[in-house]
Image (tube, coloured by chain):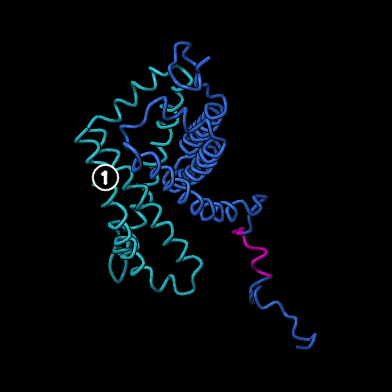
Amino acid sequence: MSATTETNYHAGPDAVSAKKSRYRRVSKGRGNFELWSWVFMRASGILLLVLIFGHLFVNLMLGEGIHGIDFAFVAGKWSSPFWQTWDMLMLWLAELHGFNGVRTIINDYTEKDRTRWILKGLLVASALLVMVLGTLVIFTFDPCLDPSSTLSVCAR
Amino acid sequence: MAQAANGTLYRGREGMWSWVAHRISGLLLFLFLFAHVLDTALVRVSPDAYNQVMEAYKNPVVGIGEAGLVAAVIFHALNGLRIIAVDFWAKGPKYQRQLFWAVAIGFVVLFAPFAIRHLTIVFTH
């Protein structure tokens, strides 16, 4: 390869006229946001597969399944930092994955700017609510909330 | 349906229907997550409030709904792996239809044992 072959073929024969075109296909300041959201969907998807299948197996298949789930069951699980971390990761990744998916659906089907912004406003509000409330619940959980609790951890 | 010169604009078959099912199952799971975080938040209100709502989950009608929810999770997870294969595996796009049927088989293999176990618990307790 000699230095004389440095023509930018990717620019194409109309590179100069395209510059004058009124169609601007170059994004304006959005950076690589859509690329990273695409990468995030795939990476979080794989992690969620492990986190959610594990969650479903432990809560619905082991022991008494759905009939074993009550306040004491939650108290048992969240006495362990392992399950607190598991549930927090699952909560954040699932909510952001779902947020991004619903954002795509809104972009695909809304035609009016106003409708799009209202729906996205609701989406952002609900995602913040779910992540903040969920995280607080996991880490401020008190197994002895009820003073007359009979759980063994609450024995004095 | 919109028509193109050589058939319908939407091509149908495995590619399109898996895309439709992925959207619907994803939206359903997102809505459930909202409800699920709120119901779990009741553990901060009182043990009784939480236990009462959990009783509703043990009702047979809701139990069938839970099986549907797990079906949505399994399909969305396996079809998500298919999407990753189509994106990153050189031969993924060529075999996307075969991958769809692999998803279908994987779905039955995972969902059947779950449905038997879960519905047995729901209906015989």
What residue is drawn where x is 41% and y is 27%? B39
What residue is drawn where x is 38% and y is 45%? A57
Q: Residue furthest left?
A: B124
Apparent side of residue B60 relative to residue B10 in the rendered image (left or right): left
Around disc 1, counting alpha carbons within 10 Å, would you say few (fewer than 14), some (14 to 19), or many (20 or more)?
Answer: some
Q: Which residue is mark 1?
A: B117
Chain B, hue in figure: cyan
- Chain for numbered disc 1: B
Quadrant in which the N terminus of chain B is drawn: bottom left
What percent of the width, then of the height, locates residue A117? 51, 36
Q: Residue furthest front?
A: A156
Comparing A50 with A132, the one in front is A50
Q: Which residues are magenta?
A: A16-25
Q: Looking at numbered disc 1 in the image, what kind of residue is underneath it?
A: Arg
What percent of the width, then of the height, locates residue B113? 27, 51
Apparent side of residue B124 relative to residue B41 in the rendered image (left or right): left
Comparing A102 with A79, the one in front is A79
Which chain is blue in the picture?
Answer: A
Task: For mark 1, give the secondary structure.
Answer: helix
Quadrant in which the C terminus of chain B is drawn: top left
Comparing A142 with A36, the one in front is A142
What residue is drawn where x is 31% and y is 36%? A64
Comparing A149 with B55, the one in front is A149
